[in-house]
């Protein structure tokens, strides 16, 4: 398959969006930018399109996809209209009034029309209305319902620029819409509205504190920061190793006065073994490390900047052939919860306390 790359920086570029929409309607796959990361889109109501997404990513088929819509009213085709689900839909409406369009995905009981291939065999459906204007225009051009996980091969860091989509997906999909660098850099927050209280299944830009301010009690699934779940995933990014660089990544947690000497000692051992080394750290401590490749997530006071840099840094470490990587731990509050969740997944939950 020849993967076509087109540049489409504005939502009013009708020609490129129309072509991408035709591909999606015909059952093909198109990668496109959102405000979070690049997504790999297919027709959400076409089982074959969903199967193609799983195949292109090498993704386990029990890992559900997120259906992207372009307006609130489209949710009614996706979600069960049974009377017993009315309260859940009302909660979804309250959340949408505040956080949509935006980086929030809601899990609700699915309508029978939604294929099991799209939901990973679950009786629920994950729905998001993105804020990225090109994404919204593409969803409209495709008929309104685009199933789209991140546009990377399964387990790799999610792409925040089109060149990394091409690196993973060249020859696997029909088209890549290059819309430049994304704004947030981490996948959407996922909340499960089928349980009471509402539960966060994947942290993101919409934080637990934001959700609690609107809904009151909100819980976080314990597997967000643990790596020992044996259950089928209820949402993308829960069960399997994700976001991982090619090198071996270890997170180091503890006091700064102990972290720096411990990491530098480990870096020395790795270099002696002929390994190329890397460090991911806050700007405040980066200069203290002796790694071959030093990567700054920015200041610890800039959570959004750190989130935006993480996946690009992981990809850069791959580009530079880094084999052994250490990363500082970050506070698991606010946007830091999303950052630590992705780091833990990338490291396969390999954490050293010093």
Image (cartoon, rainbow, N blue to C red):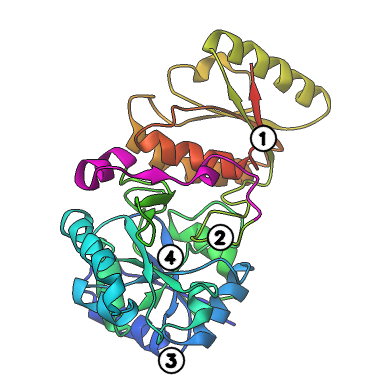
Residue 306 belongs to the span the image colors magenta: no
Q: Name the residue under label 3.
A: 26
Label 2 close to label 1 by CB (< 8 Å): no
Residue that protrudes farthest toward the top in the picture: 257
Residue 233 marker: 2
Near-viewer residue (66 or 166): 66
Residue 170 marker: none
Please state if 315 lies on the left or on the right of 136 as rendered. Answer: right
Q: Tag 2, which secondary structure? A: loop
Question: Picture coordinates of residue 17 (x, y %)?
Answer: 30, 79
Q: Name the residue under label 1.
A: 350
Near-viewer residue (191 or 149): 191
Residue drawn at (24%, 72%) of the image: 70
Q: Tag 3, which secondary structure? A: loop
| Sequence order check, earlier mark of 3 and 1 | 3
- The N terminus - image quarter: bottom right
Near-viewer residue (45 or 108): 108
| Sequence order check, earlier mark of 4 and 1 | 4
Q: Tell me if I can see residue 313 in this picture.
A: no
Separation of residues labelled 3 and 1 (CA atoms):
43 Å
| Sequence order check, earlier mark of 3 and 2 | 3
Q: What stretch is highlighted in magenta?
A: 208-230
Q: Name the residue under label 4.
A: 39
């Amino acid at each position: 398959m020849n993967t076509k790359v087109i540049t489409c920086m504005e939502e009013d570029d009708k020609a490129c969006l129309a072509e991408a929409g035709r591909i999606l309607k015909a059952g093909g796959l198109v990668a496109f930018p959102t405000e979070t990361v690049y997504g790999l889109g297919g027709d959400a109501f076409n089982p074959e399109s969903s199967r193609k997404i799983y195949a292109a990513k090498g993704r386990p088929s029990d890992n559900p996809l997120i259906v992207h819509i372009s307006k609130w009213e489209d949710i009614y085709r996706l979600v069960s209209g049974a009377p017993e689900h009315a309260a859940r839909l009302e909660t979804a409406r309250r959340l949408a009034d505040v956080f949509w369009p935006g980086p929030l995905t809601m899990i609700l009981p699915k309508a029978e029309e939604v294929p099991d291939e799209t939901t990973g065999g679950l009786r629920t459906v994950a729905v998001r209305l993105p804020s990225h204007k090109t994404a919204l225009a593409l969803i409209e051009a495709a008929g309104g319902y685009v199933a789209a996980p991140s546009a990377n091969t399964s387990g790799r860091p999610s792409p925040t620029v089109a060149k990394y989509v091409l690196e993973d997906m060249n020859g696997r999909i029909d088209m890549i819409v290059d819309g430049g660098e994304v704004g947030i850099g981490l996948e959407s927050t996922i909340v499960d509205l089928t349980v009471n209280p509402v539960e966060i299944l994947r942290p993101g830009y919409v934080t637990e504190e934001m959700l609690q301010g609107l809904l009151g009690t909100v819980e976080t699934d314990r597997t967000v920061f643990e790596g020992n779940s044996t259950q089928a995933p209820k949402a993308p990014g829960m069960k399997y190793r994700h976001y991982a660089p090619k090198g071996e990544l270890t997170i180091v947690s503890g006091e700064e006065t102990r972290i720096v000497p411990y990491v530098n000692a480990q870096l020395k051992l790795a270099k002696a073994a002929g390994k190329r080394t890397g460090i991911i750290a806050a700007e405040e401590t980066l200069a203290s490390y002796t790694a071959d490749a030093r990567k700054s997530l920015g200041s610890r006071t800039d959570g959004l900047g750190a989130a935006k840099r993480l996946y690009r840094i992981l990809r850069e470490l791959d580009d530079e052939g880094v084999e052994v990587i250490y990363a500082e731990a970050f506070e698991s509050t606010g946007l830091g919860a999303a950052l630590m969740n992705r780091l833990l997944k990338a490291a396969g939950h390999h954490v050293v306390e010093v």
